[in-house]
């Protein structure tokens, strides 16, 4: 997207609340994943003019389910990211990063004794206002570019 910047990262975050559906957290062994998405329009100085889209989803994947087959996590991330207009190649880049990060945690002996690992998958799309562009024009351009990026990837078959 012209004028837009994509960013994503994965990290451990012990502040993520354990979902209520995990009735006995002391007996749960797995991952709690918080997917956080924000698409915003910013001034060159960093002031936010508007948020075009944002959401947060928290879900859990039992450790053994992930070890046996990571497709459950891949599927959930894909379904949640379908809610927003981003290119398919970017969507898969986020998913691949999250899967790689989670695999690295499974294989890292420093986390072997920790039953619940809380992972934040943070995704941000920033569109910067251009010189001589009004706030309304910047927001309209950001919306248009998101739709075009999503259409371009779908039409070209990326992913």
Image (spheres, rainbow, N blue to C red):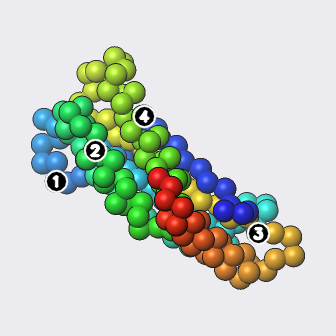
Q: CA distance from mark 3 to mark 2?
A: 38 Å
Q: Residue at x 34, y 22 (%)?
A: 107
Specify which label sits upstream in the sequence, 3 or 1: 1
Task: Characterize the local packing of mark 1: few (<14), some (14-19) or many (20 or more) Cα atoms within 10 angstroms.
Answer: few
Task: Characterize the local packing of mark 3: few (<14), some (14-19) or many (20 or more) Cα atoms within 10 angstroms.
Answer: many
Choose between 123 and 48: the one closer to the eye: 123
Of marks 4 and 2, the one in the foreground:
2
Determine which of the numbered discs, if any, sits on residue 71 in the image: 2
Determine which of the numbered discs, if any, sits on residue 51 in the image: none
Q: CA distance from mark 1 to mark 4?
A: 24 Å
Choose between 32 and 71: the one closer to the eye: 71
Specify which label sits upstream in the sequence, 4 or 2: 2
- Residue 156 at what x, y percent from top left? 54, 61
Specify which label sits upstream in the sequence, 3 or 2: 2
Q: CA distance from mark 3 to mark 1?
A: 42 Å
Q: Is residue 64 left or right of residue 93?
A: left
Tell me whether circle 3 and circle 2 mark residues in contact (CB < 8 Å).
no
Q: Relative to residue 111, is residue 69 depicted above or below?
A: below
Of marks 1 and 2, the one in the foreground:
2
Specify which label sits upstream in the sequence, 1 or 2: 1
- Residue 54 at what x, y percent from top left? 48, 66
Tell me whether circle 4 and circle 2 mark residues in contact (CB < 8 Å).
no
Q: Residue at x 54, y 70 (%)?
A: 151
Q: Which residue is mark 3?
A: 129
Q: Relative to residue 131, is residue 45 depicted above or below?
A: above
Q: Which residue is mark 4?
A: 101
Q: Residue at x 61, y 54 (%)?
A: 6
Q: Which residue is mark 1?
A: 21
Tell me whether circle 1 and circle 2 mark residues in contact (CB < 8 Å).
no
Which secondary structure lies at badge 2? helix
């Amino acid at each position: 997207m012209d004028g837009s910047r994509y960013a994503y990262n994965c990290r451990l975050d012990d502040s993520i609340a354990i979902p209520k559906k995990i009735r006995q957290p002391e007996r749960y062994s797995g991952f709690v994943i918080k997917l956080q998405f924000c698409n915003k329009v910013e001034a060159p100085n960093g002031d936010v003019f508007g948020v075009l889209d944002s959401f947060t989803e928290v879900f859990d994947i039992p450790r053994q389910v992930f070890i046996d087959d990571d497709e459950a996590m891949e599927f959930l991330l894909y379904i949640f990211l379908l809610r927003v207009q981003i290119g398919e190649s970017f969507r898969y880049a986020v998913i691949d990063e999250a899967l790689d990060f989670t695999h690295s945690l499974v294989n890292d002996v420093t986390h072997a004794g920790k039953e619940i690992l809380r992972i934040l998958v943070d995704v941000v799309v920033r569109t910067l206002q251009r010189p001589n562009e009004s706030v309304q024009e910047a927001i309209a351009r950001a919306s248009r570019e998101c739709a075009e990026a999503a259409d371009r990837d779908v039409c070209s078959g990326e992913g």
